[in-house]
Amino acid sequence: MNEIEVLADLLRAALPDLGLSLDLPPKPGISGWLDVERRGRVVSVEWRPRRGFGISLLETSGEPRAGLFEGPDEILSDPCVARDRILSLLEADATVDRRLRAALRG
Amino acid sequence: MPVRVRRLPGGWRIPTKRSREQRLDEFFRRLAQRLPVSSAEDALAVLVSTLNEVEDELSGIPYNPESWAMDGRLYPPLPDSRRPVPGRPDLARWRSKAHNTYIRDNGALAIVRAPDGVIVFEAPGQDGRGVWE
């Protein structure tokens, strides 16, 4: 089991009603992806072996190009820390969080 | 969209930095001009070279894919991160943060928002057929 599968299991154990969509890497050394959905909010996770988890809260109602070809909002290396951050993003006031991140990015 | 430049007394031309939205506008404008093509390899090459060209000219951020794209530059899909599409041997998919890019053997290309499938961009191959036709 690789780290993105470990993270999916951690999330499933924490909140069984999460929508999880796992996109495993087709070969070693390639990114794996995990989309986590709850109550209309979606967090995408890119896992890169030996690099960690790139975590982003996705825009699902605004401009369809938002986030196109951009990197993650933040990178975390520990699966348990990543789980906690994903859950907080899904629970938080996502609009405020997005505006804050957009302001920080300029 | 014309590139705005500043002229310095010595004659140097320095492109001004553009916002992500402006760079994406320019990317899609140039991409549309360079399509259609007749193969998946050509479609991916055009997408990659066009985005890198626009970012080189307008982002002011050097190319450094090792940064994991935390530098504010836009990065195209990596060729070796190609994923198969079940039931469609003629189609390949590249995932990025919020989108999937689909390229068909005939050179057709589509960029789709990942969570809900909203189409951001699509272009047929040289034979006139799109990704989904």
Image (cartoon, coloured by chain):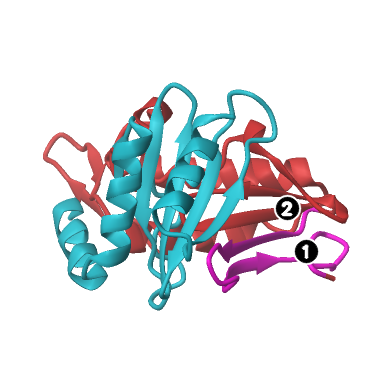
Q: Chain of mark 2?
A: B
- For mark 1, what is the residue? B131
Q: Colour of chain B?
A: red
- Which span is picked out in magenta? B107-132
Q: Residue at x 76, y 65 (%)?
A: B124
Give the image location of residue A52, x and y in percent: 39, 30
Q: Is residue B22 above or below residue B93?
A: below
At mark 2, the secondary structure is: strand
Q: Residue at x 48, y 31 (%)?
A: A48
Quadrant where the C terminus of chain A is found in the figure: bottom left
Side of B83 relative to A8 (left or right)? right
The residue drawn where x is 33% and y is 52% is A86
Residue extending farthest to the bottom is A61
Chain drawn cyan, letter? A
Is the residue under label 2 in contact with that under label 1 (CB below 8 Å)? yes
Vertical arrangement, residue A54 with respect to residue A101, above or below: above
| Numbered circle sitting on residue B103 | 2
